[in-house]
């Protein structure tokens, strides 16, 4: 038997995650699929610091914590935060683009909002206390 004789299943697997309450960040005990699963994945990816934990690859997480504690202009904050979030999320093949991005700094935290375009639809994301 040759490799060319083997049938390969190329159908995509629907993303599936454990659901969370986005206000508390706690799991609900349910599972979600498709767009809702990608929202959960995005939430945790953004909240995880890149290159800090051995459990994750260097492609997972953000470097948003580098923007905290520094005096930066609003324009710089918007540009860098959008770049970092886009870099974080676009490693997932199911996520197509990030639009309508806004970022604000309150004390030592960042609050971000954006629209995430995916293969499963469009979703609004709002994450506080990054």
Image: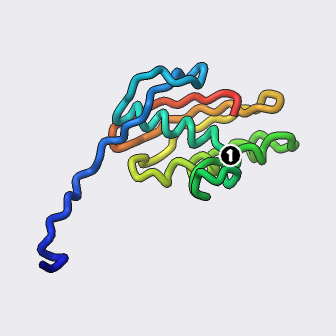
Image quadrant containing the N terminus: bottom left
**Tag 1: Cα neighbours inside 10 Å, few (<14), some, or many (≥20)?**
some
Residue matched to label 1: 49
Q: Nearer the viewer, residue 129 or 73?
A: 129
The reply to whether residue 79 is in sight is: no
Q: How is the image coloured?
A: rainbow
Residue shown at the point (59%, 25%) measured from the top left: 25
Which x, y percent locates residue 10? Answer: 23, 58
Q: Answer above or below: position of 32 versus 50.
A: above
The reply to whether residue 65 is in sight is: yes
Residue shown at the point (60%, 51%) measured from the top left: 55
Residue shown at the point (64%, 54%) measured from the top left: 54
Left or right position of 101 against 16 = right
Left or right position of 52 against 1 = right
Which x, y percent locates residue 13? Answer: 29, 47
Left or right position of 98 against 78 = left
In the image, farthest residue toward the front: 1
Image quadrant containing the C terminus: top right
Describe the element under mark 1 as helix, strand or loop. Answer: loop
Which x, y percent locates residue 36? Answer: 40, 31
In the image, farthest residue toward the bottom: 2
Q: Nearer the viewer, residue 63 or 4?
A: 4
Residue 126: image quadrant is top right
Residue shown at the point (44%, 22%) measured from the top left: 29
Left or right position of 44 against 96 = right
Which x, y percent locates residue 96? Answer: 42, 48
Q: Nearer the viewer, residue 9 or 124?
A: 9
Residue 71: image quadrant is top right
Q: Answer above or below: position of 3 versus 40.
A: below
């Amino acid at each position: 038997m040759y490799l060319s004789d083997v049938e390969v299943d190329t159908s995509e697997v629907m993303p599936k995650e454990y659901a969370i309450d986005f206000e508390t960040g706690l799991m609900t005990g349910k599972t979600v699929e498709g767009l809702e699963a990608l929202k959960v994945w995005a939430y945790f990816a953004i909240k995880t610091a890149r290159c800090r934990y051995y459990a994750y690859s260097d492609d997972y997480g953000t470097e948003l914590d580098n923007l905290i504690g520094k005096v930066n202009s609003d324009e710089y904050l918007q540009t860098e935060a959008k770049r970092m979030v886009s870099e974080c999320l676009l490693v997932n093949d199911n996520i197509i683009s990030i639009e309508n991005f806004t970022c604000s700094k309150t004390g030592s935290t960042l609050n971000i909002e954006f629209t995430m375009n995916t293969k499963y639809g469009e979703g609004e994301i709002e994450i506080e206390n990054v």
